[in-house]
Image (cartoon, rainbow, N blue to C red):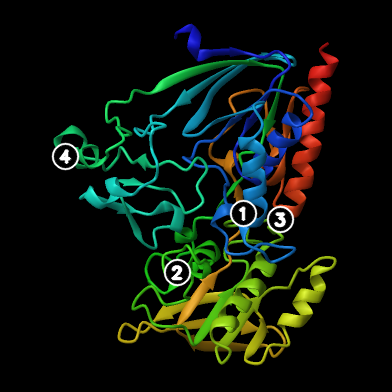
Amino acid sequence: MSEADVIASPKGILVIGGGMAGITAAVEAAEVGYDVFLVEKEAYLGGRVVRANEYFPKLCSPSCGLEINFRRIKTNPKVRVFTLAEVESISGKECAYEVNVKLTPRMVNDNCTACNKCVEACPVERPNDFNYGLDNTKAIYLPHSMAFPMKYVIDPKVCLGAECAQCVAACQYDAIDLKMPPKGLKLFVGSVVIATGWKPYDATKLDTLGFGKYSNVITNVMMERLAAPDGPTQGKIVRPSDGKAVNSIAFAQCAGSRDVNHLPYCSGVCCLASLKQSTYVKEQNPEARISIFYIDIRAQGTLEDFYQRVQRYEGLSLVNGKVARIEEDPNTRDLTVEAEDVASGKKVRETVEMVVLATGMVPATAETKIPYEVTYDAYGFVASAPAGIYAAGCVKRPTDVSFSVQDATGAALKAIQSVVRGG
């Protein structure tokens, strides 16, 4: 590894994860004068929030908060951002950490102007993971419309490489380098913030609910992308099977959550997400019939008012019962939802055109551990870490954007106090 690949900043702070919590921790620490190294495994910053259509408490677009934070990063030389980057090892102790980072090649350099000529020339398609596979991109693509950094990236798993190279020929700015090598980066920092976020529970494990088997059964995160103006349908809520506008829809709460066979805990945000998504449906089709099947509705604090407002919508019914089974009519692709209505004690069967499964939050650390002496609870959330290493946001517990921002600000303060203690 060359000297250029080594950065030493004894009072610097490493932030692992470029979602809302990681971005917040990074800008808060940098704006009081500390070097910050923000490492994100995806090709862009923004995490799960940037994939939402709207988020609480203001029900505004993610661009509201993210655009401001991206500007704060761009104008602050104290923040160094590394995308397509993963921490491979951490050693040392508080105020003296040595961190090895693997940098995956983007195969697109800083000459990129996002002109899209390369995409037009590329003959290969891939499922669009940003849209949860609801559409496709080319092998070279811009991750999303407000991506930071605003640069294209090549998926090496599907790119044909030099035997194709049509994107190279189409680019007049010499921005594409198909031979760009992977790199290593060694950082010497004083403290670390873990903000690796969460992922949706794998709905294919819910074998009675039809996800992956029936095309019109989707998850709550997919619903956000359907409703988003920059999503696969330009914000139109339609059935994946036929592109038909939705006139009837069911939301199945606690899909896998509060279930000893899946996620025993409550993620806290799923009820409100479904209530919010009901407003998306009603805004597009006021006559739509909506059913929400639930164990209990959890809307804390001022958001109780939102719950009270939504439940008064005409054509919306709340059924106190957990969905047990979903079946498809192979001719119409309509879905029959089966549940027990706790209030009446009777079995309910309701046929709708689409079903949204409210799946819960799983911490990223349930699958990918931090390579240091960090301990986790039974579900993979960070439970504790040595002095100098601080977790923030959904990697600690299921939470919403507002709390993640507050928690990340606290983690940044603790990280600063850590390097100050070290002198």
Judge whether 353 appears above or below 394 on screen.
Answer: below
Location of the C terminus by quadrant is top right
Q: Which residue does the numbered mark 2 point to in the structure image?
A: 234
Measured Cα–Cα span from mark 4 to mark 3? 44 Å
Q: Amino acid at mark 4?
A: Cys
- Toward the left, the furthest residue is 163
Horizontal and vertical percent position of residue 226: 48, 68
**Nearer the camera: disc 3 or disc 2:** 2
Q: How would you rate the neighbour count of disc 3 (Cα within 10 Å): few for under 14, some for 14-19, many for 20 or more?
A: some
Task: Say if residue 399 shows up in the picture.
Answer: no
Horizontal and vertical percent position of residue 94: 74, 16
Q: Earlier in the sequence, mark 4 or mark 1?
A: 4
Q: Secondary structure at mark 3?
A: loop
Q: Which residue does the numbered mark 3 point to in the structure image?
A: 400
Residue 27 shown left or right of residue 257 in the figure: right
Quarter of the figure with residue 346: bottom right
Q: Amino acid at mark 3?
A: Asp
Q: Secondary structure at mark 2?
A: loop
In the rendered structure, find residue 333 and report the number of the disc placed on it.
none
Task: Say if residue 47 shows up in the picture.
Answer: yes
Residue at 73% across, 73% down: 296
Q: Earlier in the sequence, mark 4 or mark 3?
A: 4
Q: Amino acid at mark 1?
A: Met
Measured Cα–Cα span from mark 4 to mark 2? 31 Å
Q: Amino acid at mark 2?
A: Gln
Q: Earlier in the sequence, mark 3 or mark 2?
A: 2
Judge whether 397 appears above or below 88 on screen.
Answer: below
In the rendered structure, find residue 361 and report the number of the disc placed on it.
1
**Nearer the camera: disc 1 or disc 2:** 2
Q: Which residue does the numbered mark 4 point to in the structure image?
A: 164
Q: How would you rate the neighbour count of disc 1 (Cα within 10 Å): few for under 14, some for 14-19, many for 20 or more?
A: many
